[in-house]
Image (spheres, helix red, strand yellow):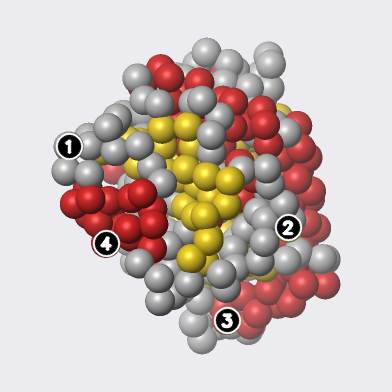
Amino acid sequence: MYEDRIRRVLEALEQMGLEQMIVSDPDSIWYLTGYYVHPFERLFALYLRRDGKHKFFLNKLFPVPQVDFEQIWFSDTDDYYAIMADNVDGTKPMGIDKDWAARFLLSLQNSHPGMKCVESSDCVDNARACKDEVEQNLMRASSAINDRVMLKVEAYIKEGMTEKQISEFIQAEYTAEGSDSLAFAPIVSFGAHAADPHHDPDGTTLKAGDCIVIDMGCRKDRYCSDMTRTYFCKSADPKYAAIHDLVREANEKAEAILKPGVKLCELDKIARDHIAAAGYGEYFTHRLGHFIGQTEHERGDVSGVSQIVAKPGMVFSVEPGVYLPGEFGVRIEDLVLVTEDGCERLNKVDKHWKTIG
């Protein structure tokens, strides 16, 4: 599994005309090796070479990885900048991870002033974007937990409860369902708060007639889930119910055309055009979706300017919304997995509007 992932990265490096790359993102290193540490401020890097002579740069405080690569160890008091410089090829261009700290990069460049450094994160990020079978099953499992907890939330919410109370309930139920952690802090928005796509839950109490936006996700075995559903407390204003139907239809139209070969900007366009045709285009204020995997937002988006072409294994969100300032908001979000001939929706919770509470 890891050999195949590394092979895909090396092939991408070759297409860029590079023979070597430093990978520093801990999630990407885990993806390529199965080894994870949080390095804090310390140097932590996987040095990949197309000739297969890979090296791991490791602080002696880290546990020993079970990998076949050469391991270069150092302590906090060693000159690890010099150690790294002595163990890479400074005569050839070097691919660099997008998130590598400037202090490490600048030191390497100072040691090898003639070495060209190239941002080559796409070599890893594009490999991570297309989930293999193991990852697909992990994302299905994480989304299944999300489905179960969302159904519990539906049954739990009652008039008079606060946004914070619902958020705390969600977190407790994730633990009860066996998740490892939150993928992100739950968004719980009542009434006019729902017009803010990233509202932080507070002490606002739920009233009859309020809309209720729940955007939530957990992490299980390193992989994230994410889903948004919008409900109404006890009754739905006809105007708001119609907007909910409009947003759901936009979501479904985008998912219906998704298959390998489709540009992701086309998904954004079909959803956005549907909302705009009803007069609410200016109130759909964000991109249609984002990629997801080990982290809630991974490289790649579903927007009007995205030239990414759908490929089997890609997993991303489809989440149109309409936000009327001071009034109301609705968002409906699924995660979708691109299959060989279409897509699989990872969330099974019904998307039609309903009254609860």
- What's under tag 1, amino acid-wise? Gly
Name the spot of residue 54 as percent of width and height, x first: 53, 38
Is mark 2 in CB contact (under 8 Å) with mark 3?
no
Q: Considering only order in the chain, which callout, 4 or 1, is on the residue closer to the N terminus?
A: 4
Give the quarter of the image for residue 65.
bottom right
Q: Position of residue 288 (x, y in %)?
A: 44, 39
Q: Which residue is mark 4?
A: 103
Q: Mark 3 = which residue?
A: 164
Q: Quadrant of residue 4?
A: top right
| Cα–Cα span, label 3 and label 4 | 40 Å
Kindly identify which residue carries mark 1.
114
Amino acid type, mark 2: Lys
Q: Nearer the viewer, residue 36 or 59?
A: 59
Residue 34 can be seen in this image: yes
> Marks 2/4: CA distance?
33 Å
Q: Nearer the viewer, mark 3 or mark 4?
A: 4
Q: CA distance from mark 2 to mark 3?
A: 23 Å
Q: Looking at the image, is mark 3 or mark 4 earlier in the sequence?
A: 4
Inter-mark Cα distance, 1 to 2: 44 Å
Q: Earlier in the sequence, mark 3 or mark 1?
A: 1
Which amino acid type corresponds to the residue marked 3 in the rendered image? Lys
| Residue lying at the far front of the rendered structure | 86
Label 3, label 1: how many angstroms apart (C-alpha)? 55 Å
Front position among marks 1 and 4: 1
Above or below, 18 relative to 224:
above
Residue 220, labelled with which disc?
Answer: 2
